[in-house]
Image (cartoon, rainbow, N blue to C red):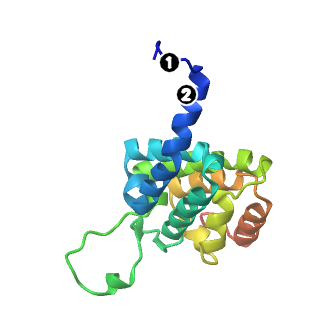
Amino acid sequence: NPASKKESDVRHKELREVIHAPLLQALTTDVEHVIRNKSASQVLITAMNISNESPEQSAKLMRSLAELLAQPLDPSTGHIVTEEDTIEDDAEPRVHPVDDESGHLALRKLFRQDPDRVKRQEQTLADTVNNLVPENGYLAWAKSNRGAFVLVSLFRAGVESVSERLKEEFKEVDLTDG
């Protein structure tokens, strides 16, 4: 705006401050849809990149995303395993975000933001996910190509407890084809 007396940087900062928390709140309410939608996931990635501006709302979004990722993955189908799966119904199976076309790319980008959060001593998505994924849950992720790439990004997130757990879970895995 050429008529504005404020510097461009100041205007941008003020706009971010006003919109960031409500945006994170909106993303949190439907995180499953957001992570699977190519355009919406880009908004999520960008909003989380400045998560330090709304730490409380960012923590809620991370928790919501981690709860989604903690759901069991059926490696043979790439779907989320739910209790309803035992009942015959017409419900469409839900693809796990780790195995989803858009979801896995978004997760990789989100985990790549964690080293900066570690430097700022903030809560990380990697640690939040790690606290909720059940024991040996990562093994199911590793059985798909997309899941393996997500695990590499998770490992590279720079969170010591996450790296240690991944090393421990995969220590006994036989990687031979025979």
Image quadrant occupied by the C terminus:
bottom right
Residue mark closest to the camera, 2 vs 1: 1
Image quadrant occupied by the N terminus:
top left
Residue occupying image coordinates x 52% and y 54%:
145
Closest to the observer: 54 or 168?
Answer: 54
| The quarter of the displayed image where residue 176 is located | bottom right
Residue 83, percent across and down?
Answer: 38, 85
**In the image, which disc is placed on residue 11?**
2
Closest to the observer: 110 or 147?
Answer: 110
**Residue type, mark 1 in image:** Ser
Counting residues from the N terminus, which is met first, the one under dot 2 or under dot 1?
1
Q: Residue furthest bottom?
A: 87
Label 1 sits on a secondary structure element that is loop
Distance of label 2 from label 1 (alpha carbons) = 9 Å
Query: Please, is residue 99 above or below residue 80 in the view?
Result: above
Kindly tell me whether residue 115 is visible in this rendering. Answer: yes
Please report contact status of discs 2 and 1: CB closer than 8 Å, yes or no.
yes
Label 2 sits on a secondary structure element that is helix
Q: Residue furthest top?
A: 2
Residue 35, percent across and down?
Answer: 43, 54
**Residue type, mark 2 in image:** Arg
Closest to the observer: 50 or 12?
Answer: 12
Residue 162, percent across and down?
Answer: 73, 63
Residue occupying image coordinates x 76% and y 70%:
168
Residue 89, percent across and down?
Answer: 21, 81
Local crowd at mark 2 within 10 Å, few (<14), some, or many (≥20)? some
Where is mark 1, residue-wise?
4
Residue occupying image coordinates x 24% and y 73%:
91
Query: Please, is residue 6 above or below residue 101 in the view?
Result: above
